[in-house]
C-alpha cells in the first residue's frame, strides 16, 4: 500500500488498473518525481502490450513436517504439519465416498429416466479444484419437507440425495472441529462453508457464517433488524420502508420529507453533497450517479465482504475466540463504523475531488485514502471495474480492522500488502457460485508468464526484504506486482492450502495493533517452518504444475470441440 508523506503520518493507497502505465520512469528521472508518480502505481499489470502477450502465451501453451506457528490470543504456539496432512487425507476419503454414493444415485436416476436429476447429482460429485476457493450463495428459505404427493420414484431420489448430503455435512462438521483444535482456522472455515453447501439448514454452520433464522428464512442479524423495523430489501433501490416500495416502482422518490419524481431527485443529487446514500450491513456507499448503481456497488461489496471474512476468518478472530464460536458463542453483530465508499458519476468529478490530495490522480482508477478512511471510485461505462473495487476494499477492510492509524510494511514485507489485494481482485460472482483465485485470472497469468517466459523471479528472501519505497521505486515494479500476485496465490493454494494460515497470520501481524505496542513481524519462513530457498523451489514447482493443468484442460476442450475457457 504505497504512501505519500503529508503533514499527517497516515498512508495513501491507490490502485491503477491501466496497462499503459506499466512502463516505469527511467532512473534518470528526478527521485522526487519518481516517488510521487510511483506512489499512485498500486496495481500495475504489465508493460505496454504485455497483458495481450501473456494472454497469447497462455492460449498457445493451450511437508515438509516442520512446525507451523499460529496466533492464539497474541501468543505463538506450534503444531505438527503431519496432523494436518492426516486430516486432509480423512477429508479426501470422505469426499471420495460421498462422490461414489452420488454417482451411484445418479446411475439410478438414469435407469429410472430422471436425466436432469442425474446431471445435477453428477455436478455435486465432481472433485473440488484445489487452485480455487469456491462457494455457493446459500438459499434464503429454510428447506421445506418433501411433499407426500410426489411420485414414489421422484420422492426416493430426492430423499436419498438429502440423506447423503446431510450425512456428509455432519461428518465434515466434526472434521472442522478437529481441524480447528489442530490449529488451522482457515481450513476449519473452508469445511464449515462446505457443510452449509450440502446442508443449508445446519444451524451451527449458518451461525458461524453469520446467519440467524427469522421465521422460515435465514438472514443476517442486520437484515433481521431491518425487517423487524418494517423495511424490505429491493434489488434496485436497496433498503426501503415496506410502504414505499410501490411508489418507488412507479417512479416516485421520497427525499427531503416529501415525494417527487425520479427526474427531480436526480437533478438535485447530481451535486455530490446531496448524493444518494446506500446503507448495507458493512458499507455506506455515497454516489451521485444513480440510486440503482449505488445499490449494485453496495451489493457487490457485501458479497465480497462475506466471502472475504470467511476466507480470512483467522485474521479477524483469534484461535481462542474461534473455538468459543464453534462451541456456541455468539459473534458481535454491531458495525460501529461502516466502510465508506464514494462513487462519482464521471472520472472528471473524481479527479477534481482528489487532485488536491494526489496530483497524479488522473492516472488512477480507484483509491483508498487512509487519511479519511474512504475509498473513491468513478463510473466508467466502457470498463468493468469490479477488480478495482475489490482491490481497494481489501486495503480498506484490512486497514480498518483497527481504529488506530499506523504504518504498514514500510521497512520490509511490502509485497504481501499489494499481493493479497491483487489476489482478491480475482473474486468472481455468478448466479450459482462465487470463486476466488481462478488461475486464469489475468494477474496469475502474468505471474506465470514472468516466471516461465521472462525468467524473472526475485528470490523470496530478497523480495520479502524490500521496503515500501524500494518496491515502489523499482525499475521492475510491473514485474514485481506480477510476482507478488503469483506468490499470494501460491501461499493461499499450494498443497491444498498448507500455508494459508501462515499467510493470514503474517497479514495479521502487520495490520492488527497488539497490546503493549509494536512487535517483530515474523517472516513467512518462520511462520511456515520452511526455508526461503525451499519456498522458492516449491513456487517454481507450483507454477509449472498450474500451467500444465491449464494447458491440459485447453487441449481437452480442443479435442471435444468446446469453446476454450480463456485465461
Image (cartoon, helix red, strand yellow):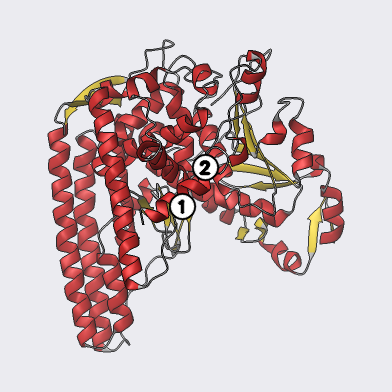
Residue 276: % across, % down: 74, 48
Q: Residue at x 46, y 14 (%)?
A: 411
Does the image show residue 187? no
Near-viewer residue (218 or 551): 551
For mark 2, what is the residue? 50
Circle 1: element type = helix
For mark 1, what is the residue? 56
Circle 2: element type = helix
170 sits left or right of 282 in the view:
left
CB-based contact (under 8 Å), mark 2 and mark 1: no
Q: Which mark is residue 358?
A: none
Residue 96: % across, % down: 16, 60
289 sits left or right of 198 in the view:
right
* Crowd band around label 1 with a 10 angstrom C-alpha radius: few (<14), some (14–19), many (20+): some
432 sits left or right of 149 in the view:
right
Residue 421: % across, % down: 48, 36
Amino acid at each position: 500500500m504505497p504512501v505519500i508523506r503529508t503533514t499527517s503520518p497516515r498512508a495513501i493507497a491507490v490502485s491503477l488498473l491501466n496497462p499503459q502505465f506499466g512502463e516505469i520512469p527511467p532512473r534518470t528521472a528526478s527521485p522526487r518525481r519518481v516517488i510521487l508518480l510511483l506512489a499512485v502505481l498500486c496495481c500495475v499489470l504489465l508493460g505496454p502490450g504485455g497483458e495481450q502477450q501473456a494472454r497469447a502465451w497462455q492460449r498457445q501453451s493451450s511437508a515438509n513436517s516442520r512446525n507451523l506457528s499460529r496466533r492464539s490470543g497474541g501468543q505463538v504456539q506450534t503444531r505438527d504439519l503431519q496432523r494436518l496432512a492426516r486430516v486432509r487425507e480423512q477429508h479426501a476419503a470422505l469426499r471420495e465416498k460421498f462422490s461414489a454414493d452420488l454417482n451411484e444415485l445418479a446411475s439410478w436416476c438414469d435407469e429410472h429416466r430422471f436425466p436432469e436429476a442425474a446431471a445435477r447429482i453428477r455436478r455435486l460429485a465432481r472433485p473440488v479444484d484445489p487452485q480455487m476457493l469456491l462457494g455457493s450463495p446459500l438459499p434464503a428459505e429454510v428447506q421445506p419437507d418433501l411433499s407426500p404427493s410426489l411420485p414414489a420414484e421422484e420422492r426416493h431420489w430426492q430423499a436419498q440425495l438429502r440423506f447423503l448430503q446431510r450425512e456428509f455435512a455432519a461428518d465434515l462438521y466434526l472434521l472442522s472441529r478437529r481441524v480447528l483444535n489442530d490449529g488451522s482456522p482457515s481450513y476449519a472455515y473452508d469445511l464449515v462453508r462446505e457443510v452449509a453447501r450440502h446442508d443449508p439448514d445446519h444451524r451451527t454452520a449458518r451461525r458461524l457464517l453469520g446467519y440467524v433464522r427469522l421465521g422460515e428464512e435465514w438472514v443476517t442479524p442486520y437484515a433481521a433488524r431491518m425487517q423487524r423495523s418494517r423495511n424490505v430489501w429491493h434489488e434496485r433501490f436497496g433498503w426501503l420502508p415496506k410502504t414505499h416500495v410501490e411508489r418507488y416502482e412507479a417512479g416516485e422518490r421520497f427525499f427531503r420529507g416529501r415525494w417527487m419524481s425520479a427526474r427531480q431527485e436526480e437533478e438535485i443529487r447530481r451535486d455530490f453533497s446531496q448524493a444518494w446514500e446506500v446503507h448495507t450491513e458493512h458499507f455506506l456507499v455515497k454516489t451521485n450517479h444513480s440510486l440503482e448503481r449505488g445499490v449494485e456497488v453496495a451489493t457487490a461489496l457485501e458479497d465480497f465482504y462475506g466471502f472475504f471474512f470467511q476466507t480470512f476468518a483467522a485474521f479477524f478472530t483469534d484461535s481462542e475466540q474461534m473455538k468459543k464460536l464453534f462451541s456456541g458463542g455468539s459473534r458481535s453483530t454491531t458495525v460501529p463504523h461502516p466502510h465508506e465508499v464514494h462513487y462519482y458519476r464521471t472520472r472528471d468529478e473524481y479527479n477534481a475531488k482528489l487532485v488536491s490530495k494526489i496530483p497524479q490522480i488522473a492516472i488512477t482508477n480507484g483509491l483508498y485514502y487512509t487519511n479519511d478512511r474512504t475509498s473513491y471510485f468513478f463510473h466508467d461505462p466502457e470498463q468493468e471495474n469490479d477488480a478495482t473495487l475489490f482491490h481497494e476494499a481489501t486495503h480498506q477492510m484490512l486497514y480498518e480492522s483497527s481504529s488506530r492509524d499506523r504504518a504498514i510494511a514500510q521497512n520490509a514485507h511490502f509485497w504481501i500488502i499489494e499481493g493479497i489485494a491483487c489476489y482478491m481482485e480475482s473474486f468472481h460472482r455468478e448466479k450459482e457460485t462465487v470463486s476466488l483465485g481462478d488461475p486464469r485470472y489475468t494477474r496469475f497469468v502474468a505471474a506465470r508468464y514472468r516466471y516461465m517466459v521472462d525468467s524473472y523471479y526475485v528470490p523470496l528472501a530478497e523480495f520479502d526484504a524490500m521496503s515500501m519505497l524500494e518496491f515502489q521505486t523499482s525499475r521492475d515494479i510491473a514485474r514485481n506486482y506480477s510476482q507478488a500476485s503469483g506468490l499470494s496465490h501460491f501461499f493461499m493454494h499450494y498443497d491444498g492450502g498448507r500455508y494459508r494460515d501462515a499467510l493470514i497470520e503474517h497479514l495479521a501481524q502487520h495490520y492488527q495493533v497488539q497490546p503493549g505496542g509494536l512487535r517483530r513481524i515474523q517472516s513467512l519462513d518462520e511462520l511456515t517452518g520452511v526455508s526461503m530457498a525451499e519456498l522458492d523451489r516449491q513456487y517454481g514447482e507450483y507454477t509449472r504444475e498450474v500451467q500444465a493443468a491449464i494447458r491440459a484442460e485447453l487441449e481437452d476442450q480442443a479435442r471435444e470441440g468446446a469453446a476454450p475457457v480463456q485465461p
